[in-house]
Image (cartoon, helix red, strand yellow):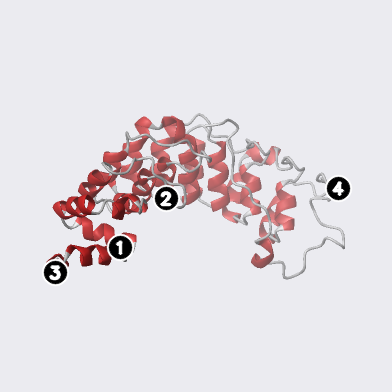
Amino acid sequence: MQLLHFPIELVLLTLENLDVSSLATFLASSPSLAKTISSVSPRLITTQPTLLHAAAARNYTTLLQHLLTLLPATTLDSRQHTALYRAAEAGALDAVRLLRFKPEPARRFATETPLSVAARNGRTAVVSLLLPSNLGAAPWALVAAAAAGNADIAQLLVPHCYELTPALCAASAAGHVDIIELLLSAGGSADAADIDGSTPLHYACRSGKAGVAQKLLAMQAVRCKVDAQDCHGWTALHWAQFCGEKEVKDMLIAAGADVNVTNDDGRPAGGWGDEDAPDDDFSAWERMFVDVPTPRLAVVV
């Protein structure tokens, strides 16, 4: 606090040149200091709206309460997120308690909610706190938890989700067998398709998750639909072949996949024409350009 021994003008000039995180830490060190600075120079606070987000993410609740008298809780940062989103993302439980009933703006993407980011980041306590008042966001939060491999959070969310297929697809793409087992035991269908017609097997084969593919192919319902086609006519074998996943391709053929099924472009699942054949070293670099969509819900949440 030696800075306070200097003239207020010099103090303000110094504070104006601090980055937002350092400014938040400095103001949080003394509630009376924060009130004094904001009364002498409110511009220092109101021209830095992300100060609100920094205080929330760092769980500086006293500072956060003061800032909320100067800035609305709906203030957005440069990524169009609120202070509640940042608190949930960081697992700042006290800040979430303070902000959870504040109004939230309408979001462009249903996937990006405070509940979803908490589920993705493994913030179990935050998910438990937000869930009762955000049940409508639970399906997308479950997808986030499944993709990240957060089984404890997925278990919290499953009872509040009527549709488990997107989460199954996300877990299959990421290779989280434990979450797949959880979702199947909760009533999920291993052979069901998402809104784009892709099944968990499509996602597993597209991502080269041999362990998941093996588990799915061990189920009679999946083997019966091993040639299921997505909205562009691609089977799981098409994807395994295109992405150069030989181990998965061999599994599919052994399970009875038809190499002659063609997609909407007329290409057979078991191979490509000479002009389309992947190079022998078809690898992760080329795979970066393969469109692997995020599982989508069949209804608007």
- Residue at point 81%, 56% (across, down): 271
Amino acid type assigned to the residue bearing label 3 in the image? Gln
Where disc 1 sits, the SS reads helix
Where disc 4 sits, the SS reads loop
Pinpoint residue 221: horizontal percent, then vertical percent: 64, 36
Crowding near pointer 4: few (<14 within 10 Å), some, many (20+)? few
Amino acid type assigned to the residue bearing label 4 in the image? Gly
Q: Nearer the viewer, residue 276 or 217?
A: 276
Amino acid type assigned to the residue bearing label 1 in the image? Glu
Pinpoint residue 93: horizontal percent, then vertical percent: 28, 45
- Name the disc covering residue 266, or none: 4
The nearer-to-camera label among 2 and 1 is 1
Q: Are marks 3 and 1 in contact (CB under 8 Å)?
A: no
Cα separation between marks 4 and 2: 47 Å
Pinpoint residue 107: horizontal percent, then vertical percent: 49, 38
- Residue at point 42%, 36% (across, down): 157
Q: Is residue 2 above or below residue 198?
A: below
- The residue that disc 3 covers is 2
Where disc 3 sits, the SS reads helix
The nearer-to-camera label among 4 and 3 is 3
Picture quarter with the N terminus: bottom left
Give the image quarter of residue 300. Answer: top right
Q: Is residue 255 visible?
A: no
Cα separation between marks 4 and 3: 75 Å
Q: Nearer the viewer, residue 219 or 1?
A: 1
Pinpoint residue 56: horizontal percent, then vertical percent: 30, 49
Q: Are marks 2 and 1 in contact (CB under 8 Å)?
A: no
The nearer-to-camera label among 3 and 1 is 1
The nearer-to-camera label among 1 and 4 is 1
- The residue that disc 2 covers is 77
Q: Nearer the viewer, residue 298 or 31?
A: 31
The nearer-to-camera label among 2 and 3 is 3
